[in-house]
Amino acid sequence: MKIKVLRFLLLISTVILLSISETISAKPFFKNKIEWINLSTGASYPVFSRWGNGNNIALNYQFGRRIFYQAGLDMTQGLTGGTNYIVNTFHFSAGICDTSRHFLAAAFVGPSLNFGKAKIPDTPGLITIWGQTNSVGLVLNGQLFFRIPSAREFGFGTEIYANFNSAINYYGIRFSLLFGNGQ
């Protein structure tokens, strides 16, 4: 039930951020600043097989001129096999970006704050327990977007990501929608 509420809040946040980004895009903080928001969903694969594969949804805001920054929220939920888990991540990263008329490519690395829970496997006759999985980690994120030539503010693409932490390490691929300022 909590996941449904979190996804609803993420959807509302996306709508609010998109309306704010339109205002920000019209008046950039500094000249020639590139900024974009991407909403992504995809698969996650825990590094250790005892955790089941899952799904992932993310909302990221990226901005910069020479050095680029990324702030985001990502939610991962285990779905198949193994032990179930839910991990929510806030992260702030730095990286590089290259743009052209048709493409945008970027790579980021930075710290993350992970919080959530994991289902501890039950033994016969015992109740299954959910244990906390709070930790600090390292996020890696690579993005490649195709921008629509007639409307460079919009695009679609893919992200490859990883989150390394002391609780649940995972990586995966997400498909994304891009909303930017057209720089």
Image (cartoon, rainbow, N blue to C red):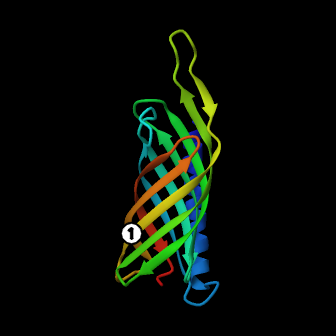
- Asked whether residue 9 appears in the rendered view, the answer is no
Name the residue beneath numbered marker 1. Answer: 144
Whether residue 161 is situated above or below residue 143 in the rendered picture = above
Question: Which residue lies at the image location 37% right of the left edge and 84% below the top edge?
Answer: 101
- Can residue 50 be seen? yes
Front-most of residues 7 and 69: 69
In this image, 139 relative to 43: left or right?
right
| Between 48 and 133, the one nearer to me in the picture | 48
Which of the 4 image quarters holds residue 154?
Answer: bottom left
Residue at the outermost bottom position: 31
Q: Position of residue 20 (x, y in %)?
A: 61, 72
Which residue is nearer to you in this view: 60 or 170?
Answer: 170
Query: Is 85 placed left or right of 30 in the picture?
Result: left
Which residue occupies 48% across, 52% down?
57
Q: Amino acid at mark 1?
A: Leu
Residue 72, above or below 24: above
Q: Nearer the viewer, residue 60 or 13?
A: 60
Quarter of the image for residue 139 reads bottom right
Neighbourhood count class around disc 1 (C-alpha, 10 Å): few under 14, some 14–19, many 20 upward: many
Q: Quadrant of the N terminus?
A: top right
Residue under the point 50% across and 59% down: 140
Helix, strand or loop for disc 1: strand
Q: Position of residue 123 (x, y in %)?
A: 52, 15
Q: Residue 170: horizontal and vertical position, in percent? A: 47, 46
Q: Residue furthest top?
A: 125
Image spot of residue 59 (x, y percent):
53, 60
Q: Tag count in the figure? A: 1
